[in-house]
Amino acid sequence: MTQEVQAAVETEKAPGPVAGAVTGAAYGMLFLLGVVLGVVGGFHHAWYAGELPVAAIAWLAVLFAVPYAMGRLMGGKLGALIPAVGWLLVSFLLATPQRAGDLAIAGNSAGYWYLYGGAVAVAAAVVVTRSTGSWLLRSYGRG
């Protein structure tokens, strides 16, 4: 084999365990980012300007921008889906009544905008995120 062909074969080999661990850690941090967004947003979405829930509407922009940006940075829809799932889990947990009768996301206009509008925003972010290619179609280690 020539050196060029050998170099091309070596660059197409499967990523090692270190690369897999780094990728797993990156996705874990994206999930934690979604959890943080859910906790902070769950407690700070109810700021009003008159009758308009301005904080809940502002959170819609954040809830679209963060998963979309993470998906673009990670190069696929999974990068957008992971923080969206973290946000959804925490937000819907904060919207359910607890034993003491408390809930962070109330059934008022701010709560509806934040919860349902946020679900639409994160879903839209996942849908519009471009993917660099399907992980099913990659040929790791085939030569």
Image (cartoon, grey):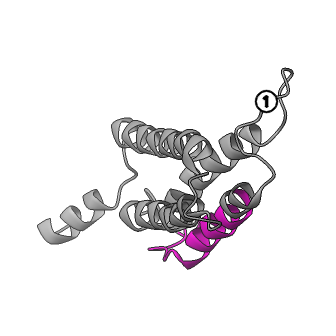
Answer yes or no: is residue 52 visible.
Answer: yes
Residue at screen point 68% across, 45% down: 91
Quick check: is 119 in the magenta stretch?
yes
User: Circle 1 — which element?
Assistant: loop
Q: Amino acid at mark 1?
A: Asp
Residue 106 place in picture, x, y as percent: 76, 46
Relative to residue 107, is residue 51 drawn left or right?
left
Between 80 and 2, which is closer to the camera in this rendering?
A: 80
Check disc 1: other Cα within 10 Å, few if <14, some if 14-19, many if 20+: few
Residue 95 quadrant: top right
Q: Is residue 50 above or below residue 108?
A: below
**Quadrant in which the C terminus appears:** bottom left
Residue at screen point 34% across, 61% down: 12
Between 69 and 1, which is closer to the camera in this rendering?
A: 69
Between 85 and 47, which is closer to the camera in this rendering?
A: 47
Q: Is residue 5 above or below residue 105?
A: below
Residue 56 place in picture, x, y as percent: 59, 60
Q: Which residues are magenta?
A: 115-137
Residue 46 place in picture, x, y as percent: 61, 51
| Residue at the disc numbered 1 | 102
Q: Seen from this angle, which residue lies furthest front?
A: 50
Quick check: is 28 in the magenta stretch?
no
Relative to residue 98, is residue 124 drawn left or right?
left
